[in-house]
Amino acid sequence: MPVWAQAGLWGLLAGGALVIGAAVAWFVRVPQRVVATIMAFGAGVLISALSFDLVDEAERTGGLVPTAAGFLAGALVYVGANVLLAKRGARHRKRSHEIQGSEDETPGSGAAIAVGALLDGIPESIVLGLTLLTGEGVGVAVLVAIFLSNLPEGLSSAAGMKASHRSAGYVFGVWGGIALASGLAGLLGVVVFEGASPETVAAITALAAGAILAMVADTMIPEAFEKTHLYAGLAATVGFLSAFVISHG
């Protein structure tokens, strides 16, 4: 199977975790404290993957300057886009309760939330595709980290959508569309950057990693802390350690 096709399928698999999480939230009433604990775990998993499997690897293969520049640029781009979306009603898109807001309260917020969710998911799929460029197959630790973090993301956000009286068609349309977009992003990451210099790949990997870290801090950690408070740190630590063990197992 061509590498680009593999990247697309792995991206689709990782994005599919969002749909699974959304389905659980739609059909099962999950306590908000449980949702927040799982979200904290997912945040820890992603931070571990960023530290040991993305940024560190990018620096080793492409050098410190491209990695640092890409990492900072990714955070700046994400935060800038997130600020614009927040003004249109997507600020609380990861929240699991009514604070997310309804279309009646903020017209256009449904579209903003969908775009925001897309903004959160695309960088993860791009870096997943880029791990295939090493010729050693997909980065298992990165794949597991993205899958495990996408489950609580889909769970929490879909719970908030349901609490804000959004329809099943909207909820599953959003997450199904993002799963497909994740597959496409992974595919394009390989097609566009296959044959690129190590410095370029390092910069793009770090750019996506910077966006992911900004997303974790802006959307996942606030939801986790709001309901678990002091226990959020423990859940995140367990998530970090779990991903670290998988990465070095």
Image: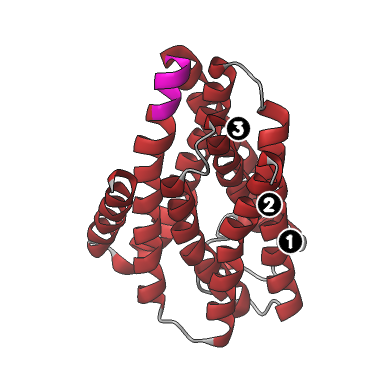
- Residue 179 image point, x, y percent: 67, 59
Name the residue carrying label 1: 177
Q: Is residue 26 above or below residue 104?
A: below
**Residue 108, picture quadrant:** bottom right
Q: Which residues are magenta?
A: 57-63
Q: Residue at x 50, y 42 (%)?
A: 212
Can residue 106 be seen in this snapshot?
A: no
Nearer the N terminus, badge 1 or badge 3? 3
Mark number, residue 77: 3
Separation of marks 1 and 3 at Cα, in angstroms: 22 Å
Secondary structure type for disc 2 = helix
Name the residue carrying label 2: 183
Indicate the amino acid at tag 2: Gly
Pick whichever, 211 or 108, lies toward us.
211
Pick whichever, 195 or 82, lies toward us.
195
Q: Residue at x 74, y 69 (%)?
A: 173
Q: Is residue 246 above or below residue 74?
A: below
Can residue 227 be seen in this snapshot?
A: yes
Q: Residue at x 76, y 63 (%)?
A: 107
Nearer the N terminus, badge 2 or badge 3? 3
Separation of marks 2 and 3 at Cα, in angstroms: 22 Å
Nearer the N terminus, badge 1 or badge 2? 1
Image position of 69 (left or right of 172) = left
Helix, strand or loop: magenta stretch: helix
Secondary structure type for disc 3 = helix
Indicate the amino acid at tag 1: Gly
Q: Residue at x 66, y 21 (%)?
A: 195
Indicate the amino acid at tag 3: Val
